[in-house]
Amino acid sequence: MSTPSSLAILLSGQGSTMRALVEACRDGRIPLTPALVLSDREEAPGLAWARTAGLRTATVDYRGLGRRRAEERLAALLDDASPTWIALAGFMRILGSDLVRPWLGRMVNIHPSLLPRYPGVDTYRRALAAGEREHGSTVHFVDESLDGGPRIAYVRVPVHPGDDPERLAERTKAAEQKLYPWVCDRLARGILQWSHGSVRYRDGILEEPLDATAFLDG
């Protein structure tokens, strides 16, 4: 039986964005209950934080399993938790179509770039090497492509003179921790929806993702 209005969060590292989601759920800014925090790394600091916070946690260690078996375990854990939504929050694994397809339209990811620019990894270094004047983060629905699902919303951050990847990452992550709860709240309340491979916002289909920068700065 499905747990109503619940959220599963997948992570691989520090879990700062996961913490922002959990705290937003607990203080009522997102009308969801955290159902599961799942990681591919037992030693992930974010997983330790989730345990301390009293959340249900699980680990699927890909080492020695291979991708197919690991994803079967992931799928079983997600099926058992039966979340309404799945949020990837720094989960550093490419998910296969067999895992993604059952959750199409209910799985979202946050990516540290202004997609479609800089999919994949090492986005901060790549943006700086290209001489970008701004960077940012994008929330998108997950489909079977790499960072290519329908884009929902993004936040822009400035690139400052003398920035290095670490400073730009710190600025971007601070913005992400506002953007992701903002989007998840609107998904949970049906203001934003998946619609046949596009994003419906209120009564219309988005031609471009929402620029949430002004909302989050206000």
Image: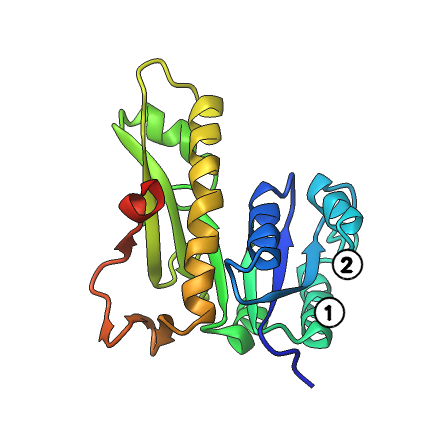
x 70%, y 57%: residue: 38
Quarter the N terminus occupies: bottom right
Q: Position of residue 157 (x, y in %)?
A: 33, 34
User: Which comes sooner in the sequence, label 2 or label 1?
Assistant: 2
Q: In the displayed structure, does residue 36 sit left or right of residue 152? A: right
CA gap between label 2 and label 1 equals 8 Å
Q: In the displayed structure, does residue 171 sit left or right of residue 75? A: left
Residue marked by disc 2: 58
Q: Position of residue 33 (x, y in %)?
A: 63, 66
Q: Is residue 103 above or below residue 23?
A: below
x 38%, y 62%: residue: 149
Q: Is residue 97 above or below residue 63?
A: below
Dot 1: what SS? helix
Identity of the amino acid at label 1?
A: Leu
Q: Nearer the viewer, residue 101 or 112?
A: 112
Look at the image and tell me whether residue 145 can be seen. no
Q: Position of residue 160 (x, y in %)?
A: 32, 20
Q: In the displayed structure, does residue 157 sit left or right of residue 123? A: left
Quarter the C terminus occupies: top left
Answer with the quarter of the image where residue 196 lies: bottom left
x 58%, y 59%: residue: 25
- Which of the labelled discs sits on residue 68, or is there none? none
Q: Do callouts 2 and 1 mark residues in contact (Cβ within 8 Å)?
A: yes
Residue marked by disc 1: 77
Dot 2: what SS? strand
